[in-house]
Amino acid sequence: MAPRYSNVVIFTGQFGLGLLHTCFSFYYVKVFLNVFKVNEYWFNVSQLLYMLWNAVNDPLFGYLQDVGGTWMKDRSKIFTWFGPPMSLAFLTLWFPWGGPDSPPWVEGLHMIVALFLYDAFFSCIGVAWGALFTESTRDHRKRVKALKYSQTAILCSVNVIMIMEKASHSLDNFGAFQNVSIMLAIVAAACFVITGYKSSDPAPTGYSRDKLLSVDDDEEAPSLSHPHSFKSVLATTKELFASRDFQVVMATNFIHTCRSTAHLNFASIATDLVIPQSVLSKGSWQLSVFFAVCTLMPQILIILNERLIVRAGAYRIIMVSFLASMMSAAMYPLSRSPYVVMFFMLIDMITVHSTAPLFNIFLAEFIEDDAVRNKRKSTLSSIVFSLNALIIKPATSIAPVIIVYLLNRSGYTIYQHDHISTPQLSNCMLRILFATPVFLGFLQFVLFRKYSLRHRVSASKLALPL
């Protein structure tokens, strides 16, 4: 991919994915629980099957794009051919299959099919975008700059929450929600087509052997002699999983995804349960602005602090965020005040969502290090990003199931019908909000201290002109 196109591709690809996935993550749990009235049994079944599907489709698309020897090795075709179908799959989520008198299995089946379709296309395009991110950059500084374009795209795309909240009156006007979702699907499809067109430049997209390795011409670099064989695929996967740094990044990212999913899926439900209507009423501009600040601030911080990330390094930034996240839970004794809860939610959103994009840098660092250590002829960008998705995607199912289970034990099923929050339910939601950063943030801090590539990255980073 030619350099003049790389930042355009990073932006348009991320913007299209961001439009659809922000809306999906923020609303699908609430829509199926509160609008379509899916019961707990079918909700849990759909999440279990969704998790199993994630375990299959992510590595499948990753290996097809890197070692499969098919047209899917062409990133531009992935965006051009799969982008519009992804937009259609997104729309299947918001149009119910049954009516008020339909048996429970109808909407249960709807949830399963819609999640399967959407995630299949999202996984394929997401893996391709991750590979483009890695292959269009060469060092820490360029990756931070690419991250800035990525976060600018997310900054633009997350405004969809404020638009959706105001247009649908917090889902009370579901018809308006459906109309806006159609417009989002059209815009996203156009972004994917542009990304495919701009990334079709004839310049090579991957790393060449000479760029990665310093070996003599007569030295044979080990590679996959039969890249399409099942044995070589297993050998490659085993090499990747055997790396301590890969294990650390995957485990930490899994926990981070749990936290991010909990925020996006339950932010709207949490405000309904713990913030009085007199402070943030449904459909009000105040509620829309609050959600906008919570979703925009993390991206703004990333964009404005490009030089800080370059100088301090992604590792130091994310470790400080884990500490800040744990310390923010100290506000729990003051949680009877809705303004304290709102401030805590803002801080927690910032510490989680402003650092989530840094995992793209950690993965890119590992991809380069893996290519050098194993003397590969080219990087395994798609495979690594697909294995990353394989590990972290179950978090998008596990987190909602656990939280819904805890809420249902405190009377959430009753709230779904009469929309009256009890003190028991509100207290349960508060405990979930404040306990999450303490326990999960601590686990992340302990795990990520074992990340070793920070030393080598810091050394190479200091050699860059600032």
Image: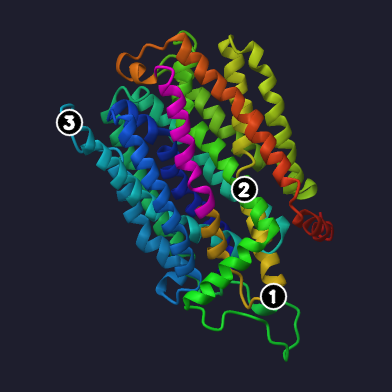
**294, above or below 314, in the image:** above
Q: Is residue 50 left or right of residue 157?
A: left
Residue highlighted by disc 2: 251
Q: At x 63% / y 68%, what residue is drawn? A: 239
- Say if residue 264 shows up in the picture: yes
Instruction: Tell me where residue 245 sits by quadrant.
Output: bottom right
Q: At x 43% / y 28%, what residue is drawn? A: 405
Q: Mark 2 against mark 3, which lies toward the viewer?
A: 2
Tell me, yes or no, whether the highlighted magenta stretch contains residue 356.
no
Residue highlighted by disc 1: 211
**457, above or below 309, in the image:** below
Q: Amino acid at mark 1?
A: Lys
Q: Are marks 2 and 3 in contact (CB under 8 Å)?
A: no
Q: Amino acid at mark 2?
A: Ala
Q: Which mark is residue 265?
A: none
**Percent coordinates x, y for residue 335 in the rendering:** 60, 13
Which residue range is magenta in the image? 390-411
**Percent coordinates x, y for residue 453 in the rendering:** 75, 57
Q: Amino acid at mark 3?
A: Gly
- Say if residue 305 shows up in the picture: no
Q: Nearer the viewer, residue 243 or 272?
A: 243
Q: Is residue 124 left or right of residue 439?
A: left
Outermost left residue: 101
Say whether disc 1 or disc 3 marks the residue closer to the N-terminus: 3
Q: At x 53% / y 76%, what residue is drawn? A: 232
Residue highlighted by disc 3: 99
Majority SS type along the magenta span: helix
Q: Are marks 1 and 3 in contact (CB under 8 Å)?
A: no
**Percent coordinates x, y for residue 394 in the rendering:** 48, 46
Q: At x 81% / y 54%, what residue is drawn? A: 466
How would you rate the neighbour count of disc 3 (Cα within 10 Å): few for under 14, some for 14-19, many for 20 or more? few
